[in-house]
Amino acid sequence: MKVGASRAVPIERSWRLSRGSDVLEAVKRYVELHPDFCHVTCRQAAAMATWELAGNVVKYGLEDAEGAAGTITLGLFPNVVSIRTLNLVEARPNVSEAAGAIARLANGSSVTELYRRRLHELFENADHTRARLGLLRVAFEGGFRLSCHEEGRYLEIAAHRCCQKSS
């Protein structure tokens, strides 16, 4: 390393997510304000992924006694972005649905095909109450690998992406 060259130090930060707060915007801004960790396209993908994953926690997480629906943890490491959410879910079908979607993304032959198929379904039937595009966007548009772990009524979703260094 050259003398005077900056070296990115890993950062990991967590936020408690609650309905009606401005935390989603704060998390997104946090990603955008750390340009030394990766290329701009990766930061944009990370901002979108944090927004989508945090939004899912706020929408589907069961609030605790303090009004938090769950947490999001963002790790910015040299050339790697890591995002984890953890929340308590109200109903078992929500856990199974999320785990099934992530398994399809991990085991599917083509994330692109899954994304196209979902868009086609939405165009064919505009009466859907929920688009359910968030996890697909994180994988397809953001280029993240998704995984999940469920324990009882808790669901943890992790998203990881390798990124080019800023130039």
Image (cartoon, rainbow, N blue to C red):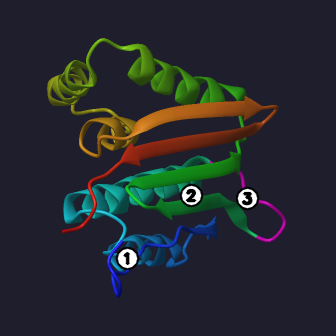
Q: Secondary structure at mark 3?
A: loop
Is there any visible trace of residue 131 in the rendered image? no
First along the sequence among labels 3 and 2: 2
Does 157 appear in magenta? no
Residue 41 occupies quadrant: bottom left
* Residue 80 placement, left or right of 94: left
Whether residue 28 can be seen here = yes
Point out the stretch of residues depicted in magenta.
61-66
Between 88 and 9, the one nearer to me in the picture: 9
User: In the rendering, which numbered label is found on residue 154?
Assistant: none
Compared with 64, 5 (above or below) is below
Q: CA distance from mark 1 to mark 2?
A: 24 Å
Residue behind mark 1: 34
Q: Where the N terminus falls, by quadrant? A: bottom left
Q: Position of residue 18 (x, y in %)?
A: 62, 68
Instruction: Please tell me which residue is depicted at 38% across the width and 39% down the height of the picture.
Output: 130
Residue at mark 3 = 63
Q: Label 2 sits on what residue type?
A: Val
- Mark 1 and mark 3: Cα distance apart in space: 30 Å
**Along the polypeptide, which appears first: circle 1 or circle 3?**
1
- Location of the C terminus by quadrant is bottom left
- x and y percentages locating residue 10 in the rendered image: 53, 67
Overall secondary structure of the magenta section: loop
Q: Quadrant of residue 116?
A: top left
The image shows residue 97, relative to residue 41, as above or below, that is above
The residue tagged 2 is: 58
Label 1 Cα neighbours within 10 Å, binned few <14 / some 14-19 / many ≥20: some
Q: Is residue 74 left or right of residue 106?
A: right
Q: Amino acid at mark 1?
A: His
